[in-house]
Amino acid sequence: MKNKIVKILILLILLVSCSSPQELDTDETEVKFTYQVKENIIFTEGELIDFSDILVGNYDSYEIGSINETIGQHVLTVTLLKDGETKTIGVPYTIKDKTPTSNYYLKSLEFEGYELDPTFTKENDVYTVTIPRNLVSFTVNAETDDPFASITSGTGVVQNPGYDFEHHITITAEDKTEFYYLVFVRIDESESIMNGDIETWNGYDINYPNSQLATIRSDHLTLVNKQYRLQESYVPSDLVYVDEEYQVYGGAHLTRPAYDAYIEMRNAASGEGLNLKVSTCYRDYDFQRTLYTNYLSQDTQEVVDTYSARPGHSEHQLGTSCDFASGVLNIDDFTGTPEDYWMRDNAADFGFILRFPEDKTDITGYTYESWHYRYIGINDAQEMKRLGVTLEEYLDQ
């Protein structure tokens, strides 16, 4: 009996100790990694494999694992490091065979109708060509010596016009054999191709005749304004559709980094009882032309130019700008809403800047727009907010 009582007491002690509350470590904060991996990483067999520019993000540094240099598709292990924390990701890449399986070779290479004249031979598969800075697409033509195979032409898009880049050309014959050429493309800053005559509408010039082509940057700081324009053919390569429930009118798109930042910002605002919707975000050249000419039918051009961008001069075409709305209200009703005040205080923490501040119209060229925000990345946005400057001033430092 005595032993039975002792066992019951021990059991009660264990139950009490197991059910006692444990203190949570509230000092731990999770390090958030954000990054973007370069797409279509392709190397040719025997080529120097360089992973120095495979991704960008908010990490401090990164380390790569062992590299598989055999022909085929592989995944590189990359470890991101930030604030003493690590995150491991996989980066896909491809090693292609450089050995030709048929007697064919490049005959000519054209970039947006600008014909180049490199010397193509059967023995050479690496070329260096120079193109004008503002070309954004190319056409590849090839010819074969094999009577039983024909070559199909290929086209593509320059992802970052204005920067030197490499392009892998794949020639595919009817017999399914393939051969790969590597072209190093250099940008000639002294040469450019003009868009032609100034476009007019009802007697109005709807392009700024003395503007320059914008240089597309990889750090989200591309400057597009009345002095710098985008080509009519420019379309961001990574546009994603904004969920219908977050839109006022529908049809809104953003680039992937801007979209991810918006969703994170929207969730934070929703946690405080706010409804942060978007009106229009990405607009192509034709959309902006229609919008601008519609305004010209209502106001003089001098007035329109204070509140609407001419086609090619709207940073909406970059896919990183949005007009925000409070719930279902129009953008004109955004000023003074709780969402407006919240954005002024918090948008920079998610990488967004108020693009046309009230006291900077002489610099931006546009009247105050409380609803127009542009994604440029957290670090730059926070620094711009601290300095109290516009994007023009920030880039001019």
Image (cartoon, grey):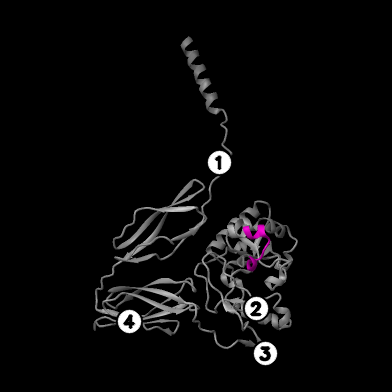
Circles 1 and 3, Cβ within 8 Å, touching? The answer is: no
Q: Which callout, 2 or 4, points to the residue nearer the camera?
A: 4
Q: Which mark is residue 291?
A: 2
**Closer to the camera, 108 or 60?**
60
Q: Residue at x 60, y 86 (%)?
A: 199
| Circle 1 residues within 10 Å: few <14, some 14–19, many ≥20 | few
CA separation in Å, label 4 and label 1: 61 Å
| Circle 2 residues within 10 Å: few <14, some 14–19, many ≥20 | some
- Residue interval drawn in magenta: 383-393
Amino acid residing under circle 3: Gly
Residue 283 in the figure: left or right of residue 40? right
From the image, tell me which residue sits under label 4.
Answer: 119
| Circle 4 residues within 10 Å: few <14, some 14–19, many ≥20 | few
| Earlier residue among tags 4 and 1 | 1
Judged by its main secondary structure, the magenta piece is helix
Please say if 60 is above or below 192.
above
Q: Which callout, 4 or 3, points to the residue nearer the camera?
A: 4
Image location (x, y in percent) of residue 236: 52, 70
Q: Which callout, 1 or 2, points to the residue nearer the camera?
A: 1
Q: Residue at x 57, y 60 (%)?
A: 377
The local secondary structure at tag 2 comes to: helix
Amino acid residing under circle 2: Leu
The local secondary structure at tag 3 comes to: loop
Amino acid residing under circle 4: Thr
Image location (x, y in percent) of residue 346: 66, 55
Residue 388 counted in the magenta span: yes
Circles 2 and 4, Cβ within 8 Å, touching? The answer is: no
